[in-house]
Image (cartoon, helix red, strand yellow):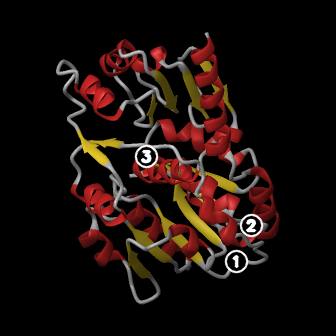
Amino acid sequence: MGHFYRALIILEYLQKVKERAVLVINRDPVSIQILDEKKILYEIVDYSDVTGNWERDLVCKYQVDVWLLDKFETNVELARHVKNEKVILAAIDDCGEGASLADLHFCTLLFQNIRGKNVYSGKEYMILNPQIAQYKRERSALQKILVTLGGSDTYGVTVKVIRILKEKGYHADIIIGPNFQHRKQLRQVINDEFTVYDTVPSLIAKFYEYDLAITGGGVTVFEANASGLPCITIASELHEKDIAEYAQQFGGCIFAGYYKNLRKEAFDLSGLDIMTMSVNGMKSFHLNGMENIYHKIQSYRGEEKHG
């Protein structure tokens, strides 16, 4: 659910700068419940429908002038339908063929096959949770470990990690998300030294309590590092290997490998320099990514208006 939670951050920023916006999503009960609770405007569509041109209907209904894609793999039909309506098309880390039609493409976690008319790369366009500003702290020693491997953890990597931690003599707290489907296996492997939290109100606030997080290879590792929390990072998907290796370069995390062949030695935690990792993370990742994206979109809007 990483893309969904990032969309909420984008919407929060757009509301702050007085931009009207509507979120376009697939039918997902968990997402819909969250949006209803937050009273966020949304439209449910069938993204597999590439012929109905529902995009045109939404552009007309909401008088859309910018369409921002944050869905990982956009098909060319969707992009073409949007561009046919003379709408500015922007994308974030999109590896789909539709990204080739994007007027602006912001690539912070995409490193191959980058497409788009104007491409902006670098961590200065990384969208991180603004809550981090309230919960930054420098860690100095390893006392508490958190395992958080995504809202769904498709392959049950959490269970695999708990087995390794038990072998190594460590205990940890565990966060699972609303779409986690491996509860039975998790119950079978944990003991009294492991506490499970089901869908915490704020992951960023929860980070504050810990000195090391074991995360997936998505945006979570960067949010943890930005808040001063060192990480051991695991790639659950093949494309996450590039992301985890990129994150490791900044010195706030260690990449433990792809989930099918984890390096167990990465979980020998006694030798970690927690303080150095904490400082490296905080100084490497900042919270102005969405602001930078918005300024680029605004600049392009101005060029289109006067061009």
Image-based side of 213 in relation to 134, left or right: left
Question: What is the x, y in percent for residue 79?
Answer: 37, 19
Q: Is residue 257 visible?
A: no
Q: Secondary structure at mark 2?
A: loop
* Disc 1 to disc 3, C-alpha distance: 31 Å
Q: Secondary structure at mark 1?
A: loop
Which of disc 3 and disc 2 is earlier in sequence?
3
Q: Which mark is residue 272?
A: 2
Q: How many marks?
A: 3
Are circles 1 and 3 on residues that touch, CB within 8 Å?
Answer: no
Q: Nearer the viewer, mark 1 or mark 3?
A: 3
The answer to whether 145 is drawn above or below residue 279 in the figure is below
Which of disc 1 and disc 2 is earlier in sequence?
1
Quadrant of the rendered structure where residue 60 is? top left
Q: Which mark is residue 142?
A: 1
* Disc 2 to disc 1, C-alpha distance: 8 Å
Which residue lies at the image location 76% right of the left edge and 48% below the top edge?
Answer: 250
Most distant residue in the bottom direction: 192
* Disc 2 to disc 3, C-alpha distance: 31 Å
Amino acid under label 1?
Answer: Leu
Image-based side of 181 in relation to 229, left or right: left
Are circles 2 and 3 on residues that touch, CB within 8 Å?
Answer: no
Q: Residues within 10 Å of mark 3 (few under 14, many from 20)?
A: some
Which of disc 3 and disc 1 is earlier in sequence?
3
Q: Is residue 201 visible?
A: yes
Question: What is the x, y in percent for residue 106?
Answer: 59, 31
Question: What is the x, y in percent for residue 301?
Answer: 58, 24
Of 209 and 89, the residue lying toward us: 89
Are circles 2 and 1 on residues that touch, CB within 8 Å?
Answer: yes
Question: What is the x, y in percent for residue 241?
Answer: 54, 40
Of 118 and 206, the residue lying toward us: 118
